[in-house]
Amino acid sequence: MIDVKNITKSYGKTQAVRGISFSIKEGECYGLLGPNGAGKSTTINMLSMLFPPDAGQITIGGIAIAKSNTRIKNMLGIVPQEIALYDKFSAWENILFWGSIYGVKGKALEDKAEDLLKWVGLFDRRKEAVKDYSGGMKRRINIACALLHSPKVLLLDEPTVGVDPQSRNLIFELIQQLNKEGMTIIYTTHYMEEAEKLCNRIGIIDKGLIIAQGTLDELKTQSNVNDMILVDCNQAPDEKMLNDKLKTTVSVSENRISILSGDSKKDLTRVVTTCTDAGYEINRIDIQKGNLEGVFLKMTGKQLRD
């Protein structure tokens, strides 16, 4: 459904995307996972044709985006990172407006608007001004607006930023339902648990490059990640010293130490001894079995929140 080959994009002297490639099958949910500034939004903006790549090629539904913008636009539903709604309008008025932009009109638009508002759980509040909505409610209306023209592909750029846990879970359920019904989805996020929960395959993007991609199991195999030991201390530890002593990948964020381990049971005593000898008081220790956080740490040498 989507084929991206060696696309690049620069802003002045800053190269935001540096020759990335990936392919997405029809009906797949593909996650772009990376920190802020990694190139996720720039990639989404090129896919949604807000601006062209400096080099490389993007094909959607067998059509190169440089050749047939209108046909591709009709295939795409776009949920941008920034809320794209008019605050003074009601939810109903926003949906009717965006539906008209997509070319949906008359009774067909009203029927679709009603169905989508019920689907996102906001039909009873459709007449209220969007400015009175919570962040999570606005996000749900944004998703509804992107679906008015029944797109084949949905582009979601960090759709849960700034939302409450209840709305976040509801957004997860909506996305999972769309994917189950066969919609092709690209989902950008800097939350590990979202990528693990929602995506069939994941591309890890950092500094404008996709450094690894595959299913979670494939990424674990590629990175040779097993367990991760998490240690919370009473002070900020010395990352370089711990790397030198433990001879493995260690990352420090504030007072937390993350240590990749091939055998956590065997390594735990050594970790505790090293921390104690360095004068760190240990408040808590957790052991996580191989997961996406460990993969990211192994691939990039840092935690995602760094």
Image (tube, rainbow, N blue to C red):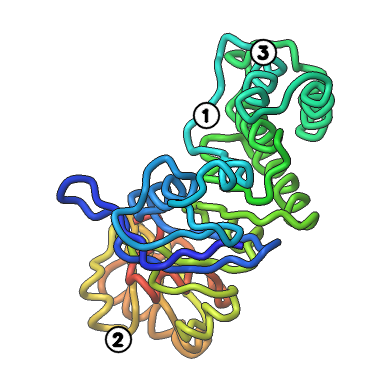
Whether residue 192 is visible, yes or no, is: no
Does the residue at mark 2 contact the one at mark 3 (Cβ under 8 Å)?
no
The quadrant of the picture occupied by the N terminus is bottom right
Q: Earlier in the sequence, mark 1 or mark 3?
A: 1
Three-letter code for the amino acid on which mark 1 is drawn: Ile
Q: Position of residue 62 (x, y in %)?
A: 58, 62
The quadrant of the picture occupied by the C terminus is bottom left
From what the image shows, is residue 129 above or below residue 2? above
Q: Earlier in the sequence, mark 1 or mark 2?
A: 1
State how far apart marks 1 and 2 are (Cα): 45 Å
Q: Residue at x 53, y 68 (%)?
A: 23
- In the drawing, does residue 130 fall left or right of residue 180? left
Q: Which residue is mark 3?
A: 90
State the residue in front, 160 or 30: 30
Q: Determine crowd level at label 2: few under 14, some 14-19, many 20+ residues with C-alpha closer than 10 A.
A: few
Q: Position of residue 167 (x, y in %)?
A: 67, 36
- 2 or 3: mark nearer the eye: 3
Q: Position of residue 172 (x, y in %)?
A: 69, 48
Please tell me in which quadrant of the rendered image residue 99 appears. top right
State how far apart marks 2 and 3 are (Cα): 58 Å
Secondary element at image label 3: loop
State how far apart marks 1 and 3 are (Cα): 14 Å
Three-letter code for the amino acid on which mark 3 is drawn: Ser
Three-letter code for the amino acid on which mark 2 is drawn: Lys
Q: Determine crowd level at label 3: few under 14, some 14-19, many 20+ residues with C-alpha closer than 10 A.
A: many
Secondary element at image label 2: loop
Q: Which residue is mark 1?
A: 83
Q: Which residue is mark 2?
A: 247
